[in-house]
Image (cartoon, rainbow, N blue to C red):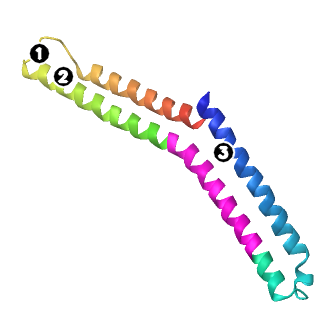
Amino acid sequence: LMRRRRASQLIEKRMDAEEEWVETFAWLSQHVQQAYAFGLQEISRLDMMFSGQSKFFVKQHWAARDFTNDSTWVTNWLGNIAYCGVLLWIALRLYDFRDGKSDKEVKAGDALLLIQVFDKVTRYSSKLSSSF
């Protein structure tokens, strides 16, 4: 719930900054003919205003993008690390059983089933994380 609230705040800030940037860009595009009559100070002021809004918009855009992408990235990494851990664990259990060190029966089908189930859980958690 807190993550969704934070994401919506960042996205709203990004949308507001984008709206201001688009309004300024549209005004400049429509009044480009009048810009030839402006003096150096006026052109410098317009350039500073547009550059400032561009920097502000990019900053808000990066913050929203990073927040939404970071959680997906972290979920994918954790899922892949856990998948490797389960793969290693079941491989060692299978090896121990075949070598006679373990009396608990583990077959290749059991290992395959566990790996497939864990793969589906990892993919599902990644999709679930990216949906927020």
Q: Residue at x 62, y 27 (%)?
A: 1
Residue lying at the far left in this picture: please name it.
100
| Label 1, label 3: how far apart the Cα atoms are | 54 Å
Residue 131 location (% of width, % of height): 61, 35
Who comes first in sequence, dot 2 or dot 3? 3
Please tell me whether residue 59 is drawn above or below residue 51 in the rendered image.
above
Q: Which residues are magenta?
A: 48-71
Q: Secondary structure at mark 2?
A: helix
Residue 34 location (% of width, % of height): 92, 83
Give yes or no for contact between labels 2 and 1 (Cβ–Cβ under 8 Å): yes
- Residue located beneath label 3 in the image: 10
Residue 68 colored in magenta in the image = yes
Q: Amino acid at mark 1?
A: Ser
Task: Nearest to the eye among marks 2 and 3: give it.
Answer: 3
Name the image quarter holding residue 37. bottom right
Q: Is residue 24 left or right of residue 60?
A: right
- Residue located beneath label 2 in the image: 93
Please tell me whether residue 18 is drawn above or below residue 74 in the rendered image.
below
Task: Nearest to the eye among marks 1 and 3: give it.
Answer: 3
| Label 2, label 1: how far apart the Cα atoms are | 8 Å
Q: Is residue 50 left or right of residue 6?
A: right
Please tell me whether residue 50 is drawn above or below residue 61 in the rendered image.
below
Q: Residues within 10 Å of mark 1 (few under 14, many from 20)?
A: few
Q: Residue at x 81, y 84 (%)?
A: 41
Give yes or no for contact between labels 2 and 3 (Cβ–Cβ under 8 Å): no
Residue 132 visible in the picture = no
Q: Amino acid at mark 3?
A: Leu
Residue 104 colored in magenta in the image = no
Who comes first in sequence, dot 2 or dot 1? 2
Q: Which mark is residue 102?
A: 1
Nearest the camera: 85 or 68?
Answer: 68
Q: Residue at x 68, y 41 (%)?
A: 9
